[in-house]
Amino acid sequence: MNKSILDYETVELDDENNALVIIDQTKLPSMTEIVNLKTAEEIWDAIYLLKVRGAPAIGVAAAVGIYLLAKKIETDDYETFYQEFCKQKEYLNSSRPTAVNLSWALNRMEQVCVANRDKTVAEIKELLKKEAILIKEEDIQVCKSIGEYGLSLLKKGDGILTHCNAGQLATCKYGTATAPIYLGLERGYNFRVFADETRPLLQGARLTAYELHSAGVDVTLICDNMSATVMRNGWVNAVFVGCDRVAANGDVANKIGTSVVATVAKRYNVPFYVCAPTSTIDMNTPTGADITIEQRPDHEVTEMWYKERMAPEGVKVFNPAFDVTDHDLISGIVTEYGIARAPYTESLKEIFKNK
Ligand code: MRU
């Protein structure tokens, strides 16, 4: 039987071969290429080039990656080991700025070193491996829990619109925004899903439409400029999106175009939900204005995916990878510990208190 894309691991540790194993998501859906990453540069490039992408998957890849890089440090002296670990950590952390899961996972790995400084370097390396595996296992449970809370907001036959890919390919299983859809599929909810294609990197077309279609979900691909039409037609009962960083006031950074969808949803009274594991909530960032938005190269807009260049040479390009959706456009933030509602300054604190 043919393997479905959902049968592959998004991120995997091959400890024997000292490799971080990923699916190269830039090649999907036409080619399923499994890549072994061994050096710091290969891991950095894979994250920067979006071979592995989506906030939770980036976090898991960084955790596995830093373990593999730490394993290669040849010293028995803790201070020398720790200094080199921090150097590698900072390097990986510089690969993408917006998804907080990257620094969250790397900081968690660093804490393993710090808390076990009295142990031998060999023992610390073993503990780092355990932590990386735990971060991956937790991600699966977290997504499942987000799926349950998300499903409680939906009813059978609902139409759902999603933007970018917050699917299994962005996590280790289920996805965040797609988790209610996958759980609903198992339970006969018969959702109708609209997937925005998501210019310029087409994560919606290449990844979300692909994985949902492979799973047997009723999914319709639309261009980004069609979301108002499907909402105006009354075909959408709820919008579910993922996110890269939630600020303490509930402002949310997610793939560019998300705030347009949120604004249109408000106009047509469609509830707009953001799915966010607590690893994506950054209580140290006060508002959306404090979130660094990644700027990406011009060629992603002018040439990439086209057979020939589609814009005049030398034209100015603005290519932010993410935008901020203001908290007043968000109906709820779905976490693994429950659904936060406005006022978010209070409800997000509560989520962490009950964690
Ligand atoms: O640039 P990408 O593809 O990494 O952007 C991904 C997104 O914006 C996702 O919605 C977000 O990371 C959440 S993934 C569960």
Image (cartoon, rainbow, N blue to C red):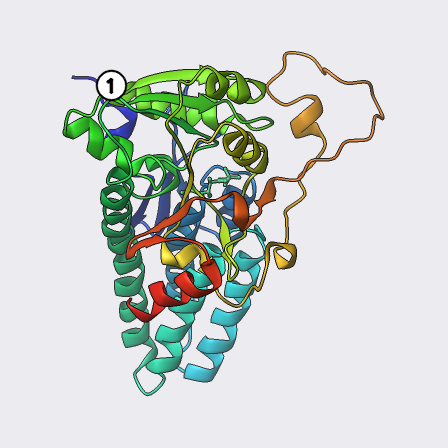
Please identify the quadrant where the C terminus is shown: bottom left
| SS at mark 1 in the image | loop
Report whether 237 appears left or right of 265. Answer: left
Residue picked out by circle 1 = 216
**Where does residue 17 sit, x and y in percent of width and height?**
31, 49
Q: Nearer the viewer, residue 251 or 163?
A: 251
The residue drawn where x is 36% and y is 35% is 167
**Where does residue 33 sit, x and y in percent of width and height?**
39, 28
- Report if residue 15 is visible in the image: no
- Number of other residues with Cα within 10 Å of mark 1, as a class: few under 14, some 14 to 19, many 20 or more: few
Q: Nearer the viewer, residue 123 or 274?
A: 274
Residue farthest along the top direction in this orientation: 307
59 relative to 269, above or below? below
Q: Three-letter amino acid code at disc 1?
A: Gly
210 relative to 97, above or below? above
Residue farthest along the right direction in this orientation: 314
Residue farthest along the bottom direction in this orientation: 118
Please identify the quadrant where the N terminus is shown: top left
The residue drawn where x is 39% and y is 15% is 220
Total labels: the figure holds: 1
40 relative to 46, above or below? below
In which quadrant of the rendered view does residue 223 lie? top right
**Where does residue 246 sit, x and y in percent of width and height?**
49, 54
The residue drawn where x is 24% and y is 30% is 155
Q: Nearer the viewer, residue 217 or 104?
A: 217
Disc 1: residue Cβ within 8 A of ligand 1's nearest atom: no
The residue drawn where x is 43% and y is 55% is 280
**Where does residue 237 sit, x and y in percent of width and height?**
37, 27
